[in-house]
Image (cartoon, helix red, strand yellow):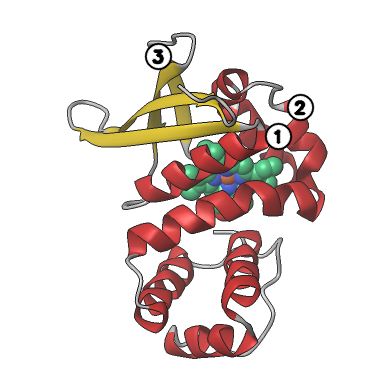
Amino acid sequence: MYGLINKAVEGLVRTRFGDAAWSRIRARAGLPDEPFVSMEQYPDKTTYDLVGAATEELGATAEAILEEFGRFWTVYTAEAGYGELMKSAGSTLPEFLGNLDQLHTRVKLSFPHLMPPSFSVSEQEAQALVLHYYSERPGLAPLVVGLLKGLGDRFGLEVEATWERVDGTRPHDRFRVRWRAKDATS
Ligand code: HEM
């Protein structure tokens, strides 16, 4: 994956756990003490190794780390120069989720070798929908849960998401997403 992703993992660890924690995680993942370059491609293994090293250093599960990272990513990208791109994807959560493929198509203009996931929406209701997530990369469903919660924060919504693996002709992860206004009492 592009260095932008690893840079964001580094940013999350440094902000939440400090520079020393980052040095230990980087070393445990067997990576050199060099900055990641956003526009450079790194093997997916680098990112998975970072998550693995973080689970060991921080004593958290990979699911918890991926979810936390997803949440962080929605803010990080907006601050890392992609704020306009995020804005253009929609002004409500369901609109935004319907435009995720278009969003990554635009990202591809800057990152030509991007291998983005693909999403589609079904069963849309007033405060719920089903999101289908297609990816070449295994094990990243908890990342999507965090992304959904982060997008909820962006739109002032509390989001709940549960997911299951769907086998068949086109295996993917299927998320049942529900939301409500953050200050709602019901
Ligand atoms: C402007 C904002 C965004 C940018 C710049 C961006 C960029 C990227 C990049 C660079 C990758 C790595 C893929 C590669 O290098 O081949 C990626 C992967 C991914 N993106 Fe985005 N993205 C953005 C927003 C989002 C949002 C809002 C979601 C919400 C669902 C999302 C979901 C994902 C997922 C799940 C992956 C993991 C890769 C996979 O499943 O195969 N992205 N994105």
Asked whether disc 2 touches disc 1, contact meaning CB atoms under 8 Å apart, the reply is yes
**Residue type of the residue flagged with mark 1:** Arg
Q: Is mark 1 within 8 Å of ligand 1?
A: yes
Drawn side of residue 109 relative to residue 170, left or right: right
Distance of label 1 from label 3 (alpha carbons):
23 Å
The residue tagged 2 is 88
What whole-number distance in Å separates the C-alpha atoms at marks 2 and 1?
Answer: 10 Å
Task: Give the image location of residue 154, x and y in percent.
Answer: 66, 37
Q: Which residue is mark 3?
A: 122
Q: Could you tell which of marks 2 and 3 lies nearer the N-terminus?
A: 2
What residue would you read off at disc 1?
Answer: 106
Sooner in the amino-acid sequence: mark 1 or mark 3: 1
The residues tagged by marks 2 and 3 sit, at their Cα atoms, a distance apart of: 21 Å
x, y percent for residue 174: 31, 30
- Rendered location of residue 44, percent (x, y): 45, 63
Q: Secondary structure at mark 2?
A: helix
Check residue 118 in the rendering and tell me which mark sits there, or answer none: none
Ligand 1 lies under 8 Å from the Cβ of mark 2? no
What's under tag 3, amino acid-wise?
A: Ser
Residue visible at 34% across and 57% down? 63
Which is nearer the N-term, disc 2 or disc 1? 2
For the C terminus, the quadrant is top left
The residue lying at 62 percent from left, 36 percent from top is 104
